Image (tube, grey):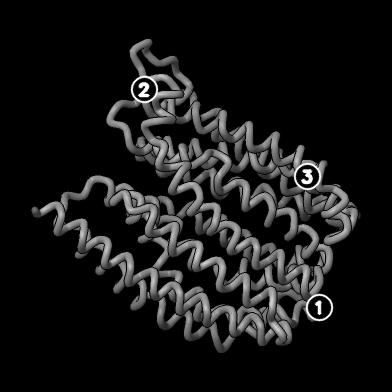
Amino acid sequence: MLTLVSGTAAAQIVGILLQPVLSRLYSPEVTGQMVVYTAVAGILISVAALRYDMTIMLPKNDDEARQLKRLATRSIIVTSLSASVVALIAFPFLRSRYGVTVASCLLVVGVSIFLVADSAAIQFWFNRKENYRAIAINRAQQTTGILVSQIALGFSGLRSVVGLLIGTIAGQLFAWATIFHKSSQVRQPVPENTPSLRKLAWRYRKMPLLNGPNVLVDAIRFNGIILLLTMTFGSAMGGEFSKAWALTEAPVALINGAIAQVFFQRLANLEPGQMRPLVWEAIRRAFVIGFFPFLVLYFVSPPLLTWYLGADWANAGLYAQALVPWLYVQLASSPISYIFVVTEKQQLMLGFAIFYAIVPLSFLWFTPYSNVVTIRILALIMAGMLLLMIALSLRVSAAYDREGAQ
């Protein structure tokens, strides 16, 4: 966990330190245009591998894990190509909603999908081999590469969404090429008696059929929030909200990113009877650790973000303050989501995820309130629903322990 935290921390620290530069090179409107691209890419990246990337962790045999990596990569390639084709077909609709510049950028969204999704699949291989250092370095390289490229293009005079887009793809390409070079072991030939891709796809069919829709719904929920905010309140709102989220979610992502991967490995090897105590302790510690930092964040975020990002970003501080309840509860709920995978209760998580997506998106579609009030109500809605998820996780883990004992 410390190794993973170090890599993620490096990426987060660099990102936070460079935000004042980015915010002065690229306006809220330009940033909001890029947010539409990243939101669409984020939705598709979440399911590009059809969740077969996660199965790399599961086989006892490394050769089967290699086959699953190949299966994941082929799924990613198909998704990436399909995304760009759909963007071309939907160009008139996208242009009417978000403008010609954003619609044009989305034509190359398949590139980002492949680079990020395949990097994530390789990370699962390194997680399997307990090579957390490689994962940490890759995360730092991707974030740093993107930000440095965007800043360089901004200083060169390319301060439009095109500069942000080229910088994003350049950073993603650098990170993918580096981790791909390090992962030659996963590309080694497998014996002839290794199950075929078709057999493995069928064996782990629950991942695309149950876990895949769950992850897709989660991605649509968060990225849909950004897309609806941008469509309803304008691209400047999308840019300011994205900055507020990036800066306030940094400590949550730092902790959750490390805990989740190690927690998944622990859960996958637990004996029945040990799950609920582990889950409860993880939740309790998260709430205790996060209380004081988030309390401070609530009071200091409005003046701090306005000073840090510049006067043009004043609303970002108000959005950051409003997000605190949501992020605080998310600190405890995010790592335990793997419980539903390990206990093979993905259908429960899928049902909850659909409900969890419908409620906030419906609220944003019909909201009669101003931008700041809308974010405050949205954050309270999300925090309440995450508390329900925690209760469901505890119930599922207790049932798993009871069934194992019987």
Pointer 2: what residue?
Answer: 63
Which-is-in-front pick, marks 3 and 2? 3
| Amino acid on which disc 3 is placed | Ala
CA gap, disc 2 to disc 1?
Answer: 54 Å
Pointer 1: what residue?
Answer: 312
Q: In the structure shown, which secondary structural element does the residue marked by tag 3 occupy?
A: helix
Say whether residue 84 is left or right of residue 286: right
User: Could one spot residue 134 in this view of the protein?
Assistant: no
Pointer 3: what residue?
Answer: 87
Q: Residue at x 52, y 79 (%)?
A: 381
Residue nearest the observer in this picture, 187 or 70: 70
In the image, is residue 356 above or below residue 115?
below
Quadrant in which residue 256 is drawn: bottom left
Q: Point out which mark residue 168 bears.
A: none
Residue nearest the observer in this picture, 317 or 361: 361
Image quarter in which the N terminus is found: bottom left
User: Could one spot residue 279 in this view of the protein?
Assistant: yes
Q: In the structure shown, which secondary structural element does the residue marked by tag 1 occupy?
A: helix
Which-is-in-front pick, marks 3 and 1? 3
